[in-house]
Amino acid sequence: MSLLSHLINLNVPTEKIIAEYIWIGGSSGMDLRSKARTLPGPVDDPSKLPTWNYDGSSTNQALGEDSEVILYPQAIYKDPFRRGNNILVMCDSRTPKGEPIPSNTRHNAAKIFTHSDVVAEEPWFGIEQEYTLLQKDVNWPLGWPIGGYPRPQGPYYCGTGADKAFGRDIVDAHYKACLYAGINISGVNGEVMPGQWEFQVGPCVGISAGDQVWVARYILERITEMAGVVLSFDPKPVPGDWNGAGAHVNYSTKTMRADEGYQDIKKAIEKLGKRHKEHIVAYGEGNERRLTGKHETADMSNFSWGVANRGASVRVGRETEKAKKGYFEDRRPSSNMDPYVVTSMIAETTIIWKP
């Protein structure tokens, strides 16, 4: 293993670089795929990268008799695993004719984020991505006794100590790897259920929020792979009296951030309430197991908002209320939500849509 580690970290004396192309597959759940290729030299502009193809019949995105799907590079990040000039490349998937395939949610999001009304409002997003670390082969949270349960929730949220924080080395490795990559990761913390953690990405403007969350997820998948731990984005990984996992979206526009923007915040929340059912459908698979009205969630059947209320669909912070400007938090999205879908839907509803 020491020789293997030595070879992985080998400094290759060449101008050539390795580009890891990342895309979203078509299987259910959090389906991230990637493959690498050698390029003649450093690249810092995705438009200068070549397109590439993959076998869509092996990712549930094409039929076997016409299986070629094309990867279009969209965003570049530094590779924390290979380092040097090597890069991670976030791509979207299209047909050989250049048309987006059905699972390409980035394409529609980009159309919304390039709408003149949306561009003018400069939407900012901060996404709180919760996740659960599981013991390999047993599908049970890290640090939990196999077949049993730890002490009830209470001491674990932002907790310290070997009996309260499980997997901190993975969390810190991910934090630093994201900073190295150029992800605007703004923090991490232990969550209410033991074995559950959260990282925050943002503020990010427009489509970059989706790109950065997907690449941060990819980096976390790679780190847990190395650690021999299973990464779960299930919104309710353990039934019963345990917190679920969400991906709360903090959101503001230029108007909301300006003086007296509080009135625009309330108008935006009112719009979200009118389209509550449409948003819930798009906010993640299995979210009904999480949004029960318990464990710091609102019941998914009803829309609500409040100041400092973590049991509401949308929460407005005390500082925002006091300053009469700022942002609000949509607490409905689940941990497995598609950030392209959710961020663009929030922007479309609050900026473009006319009730």
Image (tube, rainbow, N blue to C red):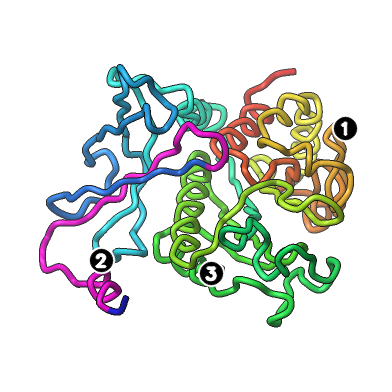
Residue at horizontal 29 percent and vertical 64 percent from the top: 82
- What quarter of the picture does the N terminus occupy? bottom left
Q: Earlier in the sequence, mark 2 or mark 1?
A: 2
Q: Which residue is mark 3?
A: 170
Give SS at disc 3: helix
Q: In terms of depth relative to the viewer, which is nearer, 52 or 85?
A: 52
Q: Amino acid at mark 2?
A: Gly
Residue 5 on the magenta span = yes
Q: Which residue is mark 1?
A: 302
Q: In terms of depth relative to the viewer, which is nearer, 94 or 110?
A: 94
Label 3 environment density (alpha carbons within 10 Å; few <14, some 14–19, many ≥20): some
Residue 255 on the magenta span = no
x then y, percent, for residue 140: 67, 59
Give SS at disc 1: loop
Residue at horizontal 50 percent and vertical 62 percent from the top: 224
Q: Is residue 107 left or right of residue 13?
A: right
Residue at horizontal 66 percent and vertical 67 percent from the top: 189
x then y, percent, for residue 73: 32, 39
Q: Amino acid at mark 3?
A: Ile
Residue at horizontal 15 percent and vertical 54 percent from the top: 41
* Magenta stretch in the rendered image: 3-30
Rendering quarter of residue 158: bottom right
Give SS at disc 2: loop
Compared to residue 89, the image places residue 272 above or below, namely above
Compared to residue 289, the image places residue 42 above or below, namely below
- What quarter of the picture does the C terminus occupy? top right
Q: In terms of depth relative to the viewer, which is nearer, 57 or 164?
A: 57
Which circle marks residue 84 in the picture? 2
C-alpha distance separating marks 2 and 1: 50 Å
